[in-house]
Amino acid sequence: MRPEAASGATQRLPRLALVGAPNAGKTSVFNGLTGLRAKTANYPGVTVSRSVGTFRVGADRFLLEDLPGTYSLEPISPDEQIVADSLSGALPQAPAPDAIIAVLDATTLRRSLHFLAELLRLGRPVCAVVTLTDELAYRGGLLDVERFGRAVGIPAVRVVGNRGIGIHDLERAVTGWQEWSRPVLTPPDDPRELAAWIDSVLDSAGYRAPDTHVWTARLDRVLLHPVWGTLIFVAVMFGFFQVIFTAATPLQDGIGDLFAWLGGVVDSSVHVHWLNTLLGDALIGGVGNVVVFIPQIVLMFLLISILEGVGYMSRAAFLMDRIMSKAGLEGRAFVAMLSSLACAVPGIMSTRTLPSSRDRIATMMAAPWMTCSARLPVYILLVGLLTPSGSRFGPFDARGAIIFGLYVLGAVSAMLAAWVFKRLGSRRESSMPFYMEMPPYRLPTLRSVLLSMWESSKTFLIKCGKIIATTSVILWLLLNLPIQTQAGMQAAGVDTSSPTAVTAYTMDHSVAAGVGRAIEPVFAPLGFDWRIDIGVLGSLSARESFVATLGQVASATDPEDPGHALEHLTYESGPQRGEKVFSAPTTVALLVFFVYALQCMSTIAIMRRETGTWKWPGIAFGYMFVVAWVMAFLAHTLTALITGGL
Amino acid sequence: MRHSACGCEIDDTVPHGGWADATPAPAAAAVSGTCLCDLAVGDRARVSEVTVPEQPALERRLADLGFTPGTEVSVLRRAPLGDPVVYGVCDYELCLRRAQASRIHVEFTATALSTDAA
């Protein structure tokens, strides 16, 4: 109909920038306008993610950019620098916006006006979106949004984002962005004159500040109480893990059973040996390894979204700030460390809330040492080899105590690593001041909680799913190539009618075995033989694959429970020939190695994405490998001394 | 103990806490005076000056967060280990570490006791 207009529109859509303070409700305005069609990417060269979306009002299309939350245009962190640069058009590949949509929280309007004044001084068209007016009214405050707009001299729209109220008014306002009224007088820069300007605007808008949120005050009296608050915090954290590790178990078992059944179906119906193992071991096994973690990951994101949405996360950060400061970090880094206990990937993603890029890097470099859920199957297997079930340390179950000890070792090491990286960090960035808003407790809408859970889970699953499925197939190829012919195997004296014998022979002569033997000298001081090396090599893509790989390697009849077969695995050659491979020193060394090594492609990929360079994932992998090797060597030597001396 | 760790110069003859208005403060108090980190929970004060000479951006940021001269600040609660502290300013709540709070100079307006009485 209007082809020239359509092609012109794609070339140069009007660009709108959404700016506002953290917690002002920017995201719900963004989602309300773009309807979740946002693309997230990184700004070139910096660790700040940007989201850009398009939306249509009638025949007009607009590009909307959601800028990071900030309190001011005077940047003190790289993230805020992005906002300032983006608005002034100083960013490469991103022209300055044509108009600005300023999101102002009605309950903190006085403070928000400082920021609005700065935006108006830029001289671009500005439209004010006043959010949280429902909460303002509830807390006894008053504001006439229309008069507010007139007092400032710009269009002002009331939007209650999470309920969709006012989005249509905003759309209508946006279509006329070229005719937006501009303030007659630019707001003054001088602090005292600015204060007078703010007073006069608030006065003409009939503004009455909200009373203290009664429930917030009541709840904080308990939740931030030095004694009760700390106890409740511990209880909340305990409950958090109980839910993640206990409530998710039935679901995980169900998924595990489903995949076992699928594997069984493949086993009985596919009679071509190579296709059978490719489908059964590599694809179903590999994908199953990820899918089994879905309940846990989704539950964790759900809990985090709820805690974040109601406002408890800032309280947790407040309570933990003093402890985190010992590692040179701030309270908000605690949330990242907490998420990393389920998985480092969401943990690293959540470092986006940290204002300081130096803190972000330090947290990212430390987070993989928090014991993630992928380590758990490995720990369970190895600790099972180390201590007979039922043995006790005093009143505690020995296995449980060892696993708990490994969690503590991981957490303490992570804090130390953060401290070191904070120290090593570039001196150019002066230390960031710590300030954090404590938003009132709010009841988040189900929609916003589910949305935030879905967004995080989706990113995680797509990333990890791809990586683990790919590495499973690659590992399978390495373990099964070159293809052994029937005749060749018979000539070597292999019983070709037994699948176990065939698998064992194929693996023994596979590319992976060659690699395992080639790298044997590296790990020999830790007591690992080439079969463990294959497992370690495979686990570099994903830790949990270690269990399945060892299962395959040990030719266990039940690859899901290789413990029994592993216990009787012996060295084939060398001075230790005939001795058990999984001796106490070797098993302890392996455990320690898994505490420290960065064996997770997904983590490496997310570090690359979040930092925008291969430098940091490279450093992380390198230093963690060295630390893992050294610590495992020490553990091996110490354990050998202790057990040898007995 | 509250005074020494704070980092701002404090004349120890200026009393803090409950009985500030009973003793007239020395003239110097108007300049170096009390800083936000000296206040006890429940105290209220008016911001007199924010100075961070070595980090002008921080000075600016504290102003953008609402700590401008003349603004009333109240001390709401202290974290279990004494730091950080939640302050009420410009109708919202914000927590600051001691390092930042020590840069905000204030004049006492009400103590914890008088707030409770009112």
Image (cartoon, rainbow, N blue to C red):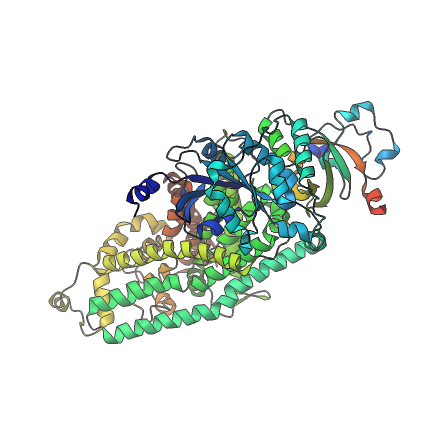
Q: Is residue A275 above or below residue A114?
A: below
Residue A81 pos. (x, y %): 49, 33
Tell me the residue at 63%/55% (across/down). A233
Residue A617 pos. (x, y %): 39, 43
Q: Nearer the viewer, residue A281 or B92?
A: B92
Residue A170 pos. (x, y %): 51, 47
Quarter-of-image position of residue A259: bottom left
Residue A41 pos. (x, y %): 40, 44
Residue A556 visible somewhere in the drawing:
yes
Q: Nearer the viewer, residue A262 or A144?
A: A144
Q: Nearer the viewer, residue A565 or A308?
A: A308
Q: Residue furthest front?
A: A1
Q: Residue furthest right?
A: B22
Report the number of numbered marks: 0
Tell me the residue at 23%/66% (across/down). A503
Drawn side of residue A380 relative to residue A212, left or right: left
Residue A351 visible somewhere in the drawing:
no
Quarter-of-image position of residue A195: top right
Q: Nearer the viewer, residue A520 or A624?
A: A624
Q: Residue furthest bottom?
A: A268
Quarter-of-image position of residue A613: top left
Tell me the residue at 88%/34% (across/down). B22
Q: Is residue A123 above or below residue A42?
A: above
Q: Is residue A133 above or below residue A261?
A: above
